Amino acid sequence: MSMPTPDARADLSRRSHAAVGPCDDSPGSDRHVCQGPIELESTSPQQTEAIGAALAELLAPGDVLALCGPLGTGKTVLIRGIAHGLGVPLDEPVLSPTFVLVREHQGRLPLLHCDAYRLRDPRELIDLGLEELRRERGVVIAIEWADRFPELVPPDAIRIELEHVDPQTRRVRIHIGEAARAARVAKRLAAG
């Protein structure tokens, strides 16, 4: 497995969208104000990995990524790009943790890759101490199928929605609550 080529990064179709996503600025809301999602389209796994690698450059200790989307939209591929962008060796497999719940990868920041697909109860992940690891070790946590248990997702999480556009194309929407950070991510993703 190699990092996405400059051509794959350059071919990303970039579109910013002003619609409000799952963030809420209503009085009493515990969610941050959202400028609207950052929207990208990918026509290959390499492009999806490139999106993940670019996003990884802006991640900080304790960040949580909540991924949702139907089967086959590229959640694991995006996380593979994030892992490689965090410095996980290219020859280290980044596989879906569907049957083991969590896989840990070491890079410039440790990455805990979680999968809620087969969970019957969110306590299965909570009992693993993810929140403590997030606070004490500064790990980045990426949760596939996060929409199954929204209570696992902290209000400051980066929410990523993937969807099929057609058999070859995926739409990736990235929701970041903090406006200044959202602008930095949009600028970095636009740079390829």
Image (cartoon, rainbow, N blue to C red):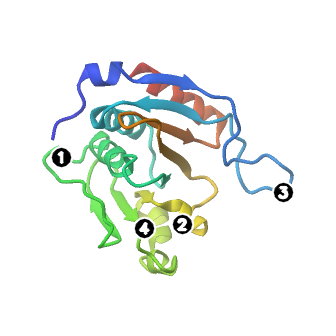
Q: What crowding class fits label 1: few (fewer than 14 Cα within 10 Å), some (14-19), or many (20 or more)?
A: some
Element type at marker 3?
A: loop
Task: Label 4, secondary structure: give it.
Answer: loop
Which of the 4 image quarters holds residue 175?
Answer: top right
Label 1 to label 3, Cα distance in Å? 43 Å
- Rounded to the nearest angstrom, the CA distance separating label 4 from label 1 is 26 Å
Indicate which disc, 3 or 4, sits on the residue closer to the N terminus: 3
Q: In the picture, which quadrant includes the N terminus?
A: top left
Report the residue marked by disc 1: 89
Where does residue 43 sit, x and y in percent of width and height?
35, 30
Q: At numbered mark 1, what does the secondary structure look like: helix, strand or loop?
A: loop
Residue position for label 2: 148
**Residue on which the image places disc 3:** 28
| Spot occupied by residue 22 in the image (x, y as percentages of width and height) | 67, 48
Residue shown at 31%/65% (left/top)? 97
Q: Position of residue 74 (x, y in %)?
A: 37, 46
Q: For the residue marked with disc 4, what is the amino acid?
A: Tyr
Judging by the rendered image, the residue that carries numbered circle 4 is: 117
